[in-house]
Every structure is written in C-alpha cells, then in structure tokens.
Amino acid sequence: MRLEIDAQAVNRLALDLDAKAKYVNWALARAINRVVALTKTKSKRAIRAQVALSDSFVGEKLRIDKAGSSHLQAVIRTPARGLSLAKYKHAQAFKRGRGNKAKKVGVRVTVKRGRSKLLKKAVIKSNGNIALFYKGKLHTLFGPSVSQVWNKTREQIKPEINYDMNAIAAEELRYILTESRR
C-alpha cells in the first residue's frame, strides 16, 4: 500500500496551526471563566442547601477573580469573617403569660434549612443583631460564615466541575480550529 502526501497541504496546515497557537491561551482563559461562573452557581446552590441564607446574599459573598490569557487561573473568594445570626431567618419568640399577655422568651433562629432553634435568653438588639444575655452582658451571636460552608461543600462539587472544565475547554479549542461552535 502506498500513500501520497501533498506537501503543500501539510505546510499550509502547519502554518495555520502555528497562526492559531497564539489563540490557545485565549481559548483556555474563556473556558476557565465559563467554568468558574458555573462553579459559582453550583456553589451557591450547595451552600443554600446547607444553610438558610438568601441567594442574593450568598452571591454577594462569593466573588470571582477571572482568568486572562497571561494568567490561566480563576479564583472564587469569600470573606473569612463571622456572620451574625441576624443574617439568618429569625423572629422574636413569645409565650402567653398571665392575663394572656405575650412575654418574650427568646429568639427563634433558622440556621440549617428546615430546622429552627429557640435560643432562650436571647434578644434582638436595636441594631438588628441577635445577642445572648450572659453574665450580665449582651454578647452578639454568630453562625457559620459563607466561607466555612464553602470550604465544606467545594469537595462535593469538584468531580462535576472537572467534567465541565474538560468539556468546555475542548469546545473552546475546537472553536479555534474550526471557527464554528458546532
């Protein structure tokens, strides 16, 4: 069996690939940025499945540093500070006392989805924070921060993200070679 190779076609292909090589980092940066946006969405869902925070609040706390063609790395950041229980769903709890008058007995807080807990001796301060009266002083109470929950949930979504990264990177590189999204 004998094969004939068109040398001019091979040279044209080599020049075409060489010309498109400079776009590889650009395509990979686009793929990374698309995947990090998907990761943020999946992370918000995973975080909200564990704690009772609003979607917009979690979205504000998860920030993205995007990748560029010169640096192929994207980062999702969260502030590592405590989160007041006032950010969670809460309400003043009452009990009926003498004469059917309402008496404050504490604060009911929902930290985990679907589970509320009564904090006896807790009060809602005038600034909206929840405090516990302990040893004659008011102490502000804190719940798990977005960064604490994110650190626990990111390992759960990692296999899914790896699959997305491979598929999207292949799609972006295919676009460079064929100049078509299909």
Image (cartoon, rainbow, N blue to C red):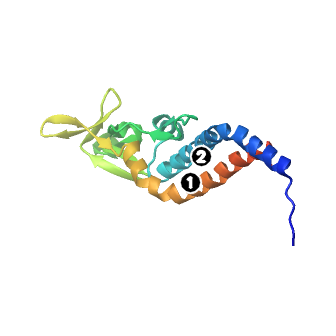
Q: Earlier in the sequence, mark 2 or mark 1?
A: 2
Tally the numbered discs: 2
What's the amino acid at mark 1?
Ile
Closer to the camera, 13 or 101?
Answer: 13
Where is residue 1, by image quadrant? bottom right
Identify the element where label 1 is drawn: helix
Q: Residues within 10 Å of mark 1 (few under 14, many from 20)?
A: some
Where is residue 12, by image quadrant? top right
Contact between labelled residues 1 and 2, with CB atoms less than 8 Å apart: yes
Does 150 sit left or right of 133 as displayed? right
Q: Give me the residue at 62% from left, 54% from top.
A: 166
Residue 105 position, x and y percent, is 28, 44
Q: Which residue is mark 2?
A: 35
Does 169 sit left or right of 39 as displayed? right
Closer to the camera, 46 or 131?
Answer: 46
Residue 181 visible in the picture? no
Q: Which residue is mark 1?
A: 161
